[in-house]
Amino acid sequence: MVAFLNSTAFTAFGAATTWAEVLGFVTGALCVYLVGRQSLWNWPIGIVNNLVWILLFATAGLYADSALQIIYIALAIWGWHNWIRGTAGDRLPVAGTGAGERAVLAALGVAGTAVLTMLLDTATNSTVPFWDAVTTVLSLLATWGQATKRWESWLLWIAADLVYIPLYVHKGLTLTALLYAGFLILCVRGLIAWRRSRVAAPELVAVA
């Protein structure tokens, strides 16, 4: 199965595209579309997408992005439960992020990027340690926001996509770069949709 997923499906823009990249394209696009519609189905489809990305990113030498998928799977299980149960047995509504919480998340983002950049630079043969680190941290923060239905999570996804697109082109993952260009459009639509359904929420003291 691994050999099949790593085999070439077709060649686009002079670069070979594997079946793993094709499957990641389909499941990834569907997942983002369903998140924008607040569909619970985004979580199981997202988990399938994570499993594909583990293989694809490890093969491309994006080790942080590959390991990140394991964390995504854990967050997806939590987010799936969170969306269904909410905080009082009802489905979770879209909410905003308080000023204190934003400060905590910003501090975690800066610290996480610095530590991960150093780790990737010294412990792996990554050729893009900083960019791999910053997209990893942005994606983790965005996934936390998605799991807790914070509309600002879309802003983080948009920021991550703007880095991911040229990064994947650099790594020869052309179809994945095109996928993330599509993600960018879906993220803008998701941002608009979630803002419309936003409800006021009390500020959290710390990240839970």
Image: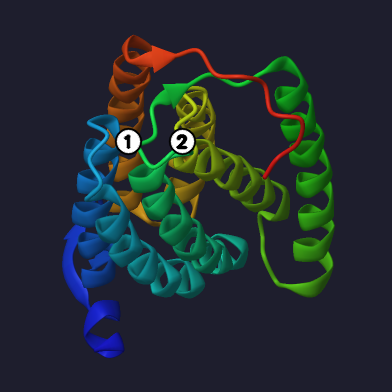
Q: In this picture, is 62 found above or below 138? A: below
Q: Are marks 2 and 1 in contact (CB under 8 Å)?
A: yes
State the residue in front, 170 or 160: 160
Q: Position of residue 69 (x, y in %)?
A: 49, 64
User: In the rendered view, how is the structure colored?
Assistant: rainbow
State the residue in front, 140 or 200: 200
Q: Which mark is residue 161?
A: 2
Under circle 2, the secondary element is helix
Q: Residue at x 31, y 61 (%)?
A: 49
**What residue is disc 1 on?**
183
Q: In the rendered structure, which amino acid carries the disc numbered 1? A: Phe
Q: Residue at x 33, y 51 (%)?
A: 176
Q: In the rendered structure, which amino acid carries the disc numbered 2? A: Asp
Mark with earlier residue (2, 1)? 2
Which quarter of the figure is the N terminus placed in? bottom left
Q: In this picture, is 16 found above or below 138? A: below
| Residue farthest to the front, as pictured | 88
Q: Callout 2: few (<14), some (14-19), or many (20+) C-alpha neighbours within 10 Å?
A: many
Q: Residue at x 78, y 54 (%)?
A: 117
The residues bearing labels 2 and 1 have C-alpha atoms spaced at a distance of 7 Å
Q: Callout 1: few (<14), some (14-19), or many (20+) C-alpha neighbours within 10 Å?
A: many
Which quarter of the figure is the C terminus placed in? top right
Q: Position of residue 64 (x, y in %)?
A: 62, 62
Under circle 1, the secondary element is helix
Q: In this picture, is 45 found above or below 143? A: below
Residue 14 visible in image = no
